[in-house]
């Protein structure tokens, strides 16, 4: 049975990740530059802290297995920040919320996690909700297809990242994994910054430092530690806490309006995520019930035979 502490930890980490959206929403820097500074600051922070604290062993290169997560991380965050710059915060985070449904269909193929019947109904619901947001979700009914496409791409890359991490990196220390993830992602994103380095204000430096040190390095280690104790499907569904937090902050702090289409579409996407959870649990419990029903009762052992064979009962005379 999975620890409830691990489930709570994943939910808390994803809730804190929802603050990233508000933190970077009004930055004027290019999306790839924001993503570059996020991972570069995180990697530098971990390198310094591990070196000074006597944990240099955690900086040992674990092999090529960490290259793919770094690339996927760079793609995911670059597309996510681009979505925020080309559409509303709420629309961007709701498009990213389709990731759990993608995980539900990738997990059986790549992780052999069997989806239940309820999970199979989640995809058309999420597609319908996404179509509603895309066509009517923006205020005034005018969609921003580029921003929404960036959000969908971010969701897909996130789904691939979770699947890969669950399959190939469980034996790598979480701190080592986060360090090389961010280091590789910084290397991938560095050309976009070096070709046209923008000037940073003091406010932007402070936000990027908070983003890299606290919300990437520290939060990333905590997330990788608890994520290993739940399934990929449950990680995907628990990730719905992030867009819920971001949407709430967007309305309360950023003053973004809520349209009826976004409310309905968002509710349907969350419903699809709930169906994925229920379907996953039903599928995992079914084999156990089937085994219990099909298992024959234990055979009774025959009494040991005597050396002379079975004794006949003598008739009473």
Image (cartoon, grey):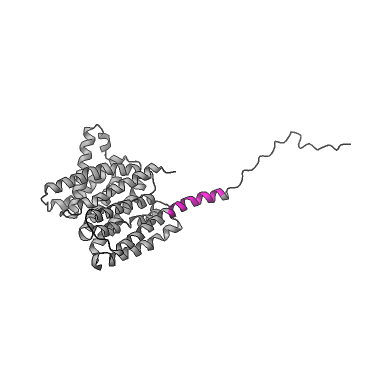
Image-based side of 184 in relation to 200, left or right: right
Percent position (x, y) of residue 142? Answer: 24, 67
Please indicate, yes or no, whether residue 62 appears anywhere in the rendered image. Answer: no
Magenta segment main secondary structure: helix
Percent position (x, y) of residue 101? Answer: 36, 57
Percent position (x, y) of residue 250? Answer: 24, 55
Q: Is residue 29 magenta?
A: no
Please indicate, yes or no, whether residue 52 appears anywhere in the rendered image. Answer: yes
Image-based side of 13 in relation to 199, left or right: right
Percent position (x, y) of residue 96? Answer: 29, 56
Above or below, comparing residue 61 to residue 119 in the picture: above
Point 39% across, 46% down: residue: 230
Point 45% across, 56% down: residue: 116
Point 39% across, 55% down: residue: 274
Above or below, comparing residue 101 to residue 170 in the picture: below
Between 109 and 25, which is closer to the camera in this rendering?
25
Q: Quadrant of residue 131?
A: bottom left
Image-based side of 61 in relation to 200, left or right: right
Range shown magenta: 278-292
């Amino acid at each position: 049975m999975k620890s409830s502490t691990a489930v709570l930890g994943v939910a808390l980490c994803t809730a804190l990740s929802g603050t990233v959206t508000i933190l970077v929403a009004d930055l004027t820097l290019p999306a790839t530059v924001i993503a570059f500074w996020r991972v570069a600051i995180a990697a530098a922070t971990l390198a310094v802290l591990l070196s000074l604290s006597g944990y240099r062993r955690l900086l040992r290169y674990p092999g090529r297995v960490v290259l793919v997560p770094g690339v996927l991380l760079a793609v995911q965050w670059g597309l996510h920040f681009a979505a925020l710059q080309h559409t509303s915060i709420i629309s961007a985070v709701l498009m990213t919320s389709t990731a759990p449904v993608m995980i539900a269909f990738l997990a059986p193929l790549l992780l052999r996690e069997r989806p239940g019947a309820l999970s199979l109904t989640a995809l058309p619901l999420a597609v319908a909700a996404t179509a509603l947001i895309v066509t009517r979700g923006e205020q005034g009914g005018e969609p921003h297809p580029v921003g929404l496409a960036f959000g969908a791409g971010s969701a897909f890359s996130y789904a691939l990242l979770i699947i890969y991490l669950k399959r190939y990196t469980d034996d790598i220390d979480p701190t080592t994994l986060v360090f090389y993830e961010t280091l590789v992602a910084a290397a991938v994103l560095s050309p976009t910054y070096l070709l046209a380095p923008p000037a940073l204000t003091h406010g932007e430096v402070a936000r990027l430092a908070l983003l890299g040190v606290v919300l990437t390095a520290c939060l990333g280690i905590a997330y990788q530690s608890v994520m290993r104790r739940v399934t990929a499907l449950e990680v995907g569904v628990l990730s719905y806490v992030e867009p819920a937090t971001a949407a709430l902050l967007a309305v309360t702090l950023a003053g973004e309006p809520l349209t009826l289409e976004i409310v309905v579409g968002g509710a349907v996407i969350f419903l699809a995520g709930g169906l994925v959870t229920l379907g996953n649990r039903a599928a995992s419990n079914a084999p156990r019930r089937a085994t219990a029903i099909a298992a024959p009762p234990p055979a009774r052992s025959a009494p040991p035979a005597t050396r002379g064979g079975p004794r006949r009962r003598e008739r009473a005379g």
